[in-house]
Amino acid sequence: MRFCDHCLAPLTQEATHCPECGLPVTAGTDDPLLIEEEERMVNPRLAQANLLRLRGQWQEAMRVCADVLRQFPGNVHAHALMGDIYRDQGNLEEAAQWYKLALELAPESIVDRQRLEQVQRELELRQKAQSQSQEVEHLQKQARSLRIFSASIMGLAVLIAVGITWAFQSRIAKGTTSLSITTSRLPTEVSSVPTLPAPNGGTAIAPAGAPENQQAASVSGAKPKTETPLRTEDDLIAEKVRDWLRQHEINPTLLAVTTDPLADHLLLTFGYDSEKDNSILYRTAWLAAAAVFAVQPNVQTVRVRCLVPVGTSNADKMLVLGFAANLLRKQMPPQPEHTPVKDIPAFFRDVYNNMQVGIQPP
C-alpha cells in the first residue's frame, strides 16, 4: 500500500497524483515530469523564503520553509535553506543539524557538505573564543582585585602618615617651648642644634632656630617616589590583538581599543608612523577586527579607525584619520587570514575615506 507524502492518503500503485490533495506523488519516482511539477510548485516559495532571510526576517522565512516541508518533506533545498536561516541567526548547532538532514537526502551534494564543514569550523572557533574569553575575564577579575588592594594600601598609608606627622609636630612644638625658656642661659651661637628625622624616612625637619643651611641640607636629602601605572581591561584586549597581528607579520606603530559597555560594538584605532600601501592598511584593519571577535564573543560590530602620517608646515609629521569603517561579526568568514586583500574592502560597512591624505575608496 502506498501513501501520499503530503496528506498520507492511501494511493494505488499506478497513481501519479493524490486523489485527496491533488499534489503529485514524487517519492520513489524518477519521472521527470513529476519532479518538474514539484519544482514548479516549490521553487517560488523557497525563493520567497530566501529573500526574507536576506532581509533579516528570519521568522517569516522559517514559516515559509516549514510550509514547504509539510507538503514536501523530502525536499533537499528546503532543508539546506533552514540551515542557512539558523546560521544567519548565529545558531550554528541547529544549522549543522539541518545541513546533515540535507546530506542524508542528497549525499552527493557538494554545496551542502561544504556548508556543513564551514559551520563545524565556526563552532570550533567559537569554542576557542569562549576559552579565551574566560581567560580575559580571569585577568579582569585579577585587575579589579589589584585596584581594590592598591586603594586599601594607599588609604592605610595616608592614615599612618597623618598620625605620625601629628605626633612629630606635637614633639616639635614641645621642643620649641623648652628651648625658649633656657636660651637666656645658653651662648648666643646655636649651630649645634640637632634636626629631627621625618616619619617613614622622609625629609628631615629642623626645629625653630636652626641655621638655614642645615634646613636646606635636610630638604636636599628627599628622594621622589615613582609608581607603576596599572593596566586597564582595554589594554589587555589590545595586547592580545597585537599578539595575533605579530603572528601574521603585522606590527602597527599604534593600536588601541575602547569598549563601550552600553553597546555591542568596540572601537579599534591603529596607525603607522610611515606611509603604507592601502593593502597593508586594509589587511591590518581586517585581521585586527577578526582578533577582537575571537577575544570578545559578545562584540557584534568592530569600528576600525586607521591613522596615517602627513607632513606639517614645520616639516614635522602628525597622524590624521585616513579611513574608518564598520566590520560585522556575521559577515566574517571562518578563516579571515586566508581572505585575499582585494576582497577585504567588500566587507567594510559605513566607510569614511579621507581623500585629502590619498586614501582611495575601497
Image: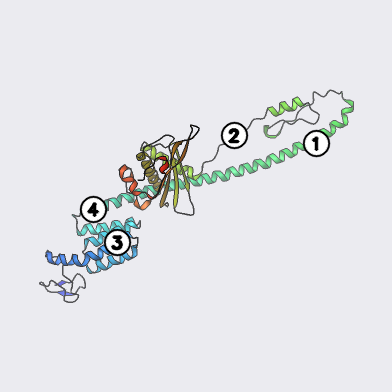
Which residue has dot 3 on it?
Answer: 51
Secondary structure state at the residue bearing disc 2: loop
Q: Earlier in the sequence, mark 1 or mark 4?
A: 4
Which residue has dot 2 on it?
Answer: 226
Name which residue type carries label 4: Arg
Which residue has dot 4 on it?
Answer: 113
Secondary structure state at the residue bearing disc 3: helix
Secondary structure state at the residue bearing disc 4: helix
Left/right placement of residue 194 relative to residue 151 reads right
Residue 173, disc = 1
The residue sitting at 18% across, 66% down in the picture is 38
Query: Residue 346: percent from the left, percent from the top?
Result: 33, 48
Query: Residue 13: percent from the left, percent from the top?
Result: 10, 72
* Local crowd size for mark 4, using a 10 Å CA cut-off: few (<14), some (14–19), many (≥20): some
Q: Earlier in the sequence, mark 2 or mark 1?
A: 1
Query: Residue 240: percent from the left, percent from the top?
Result: 43, 41
Say if 101 sits above or below 306 in the image.
Answer: below
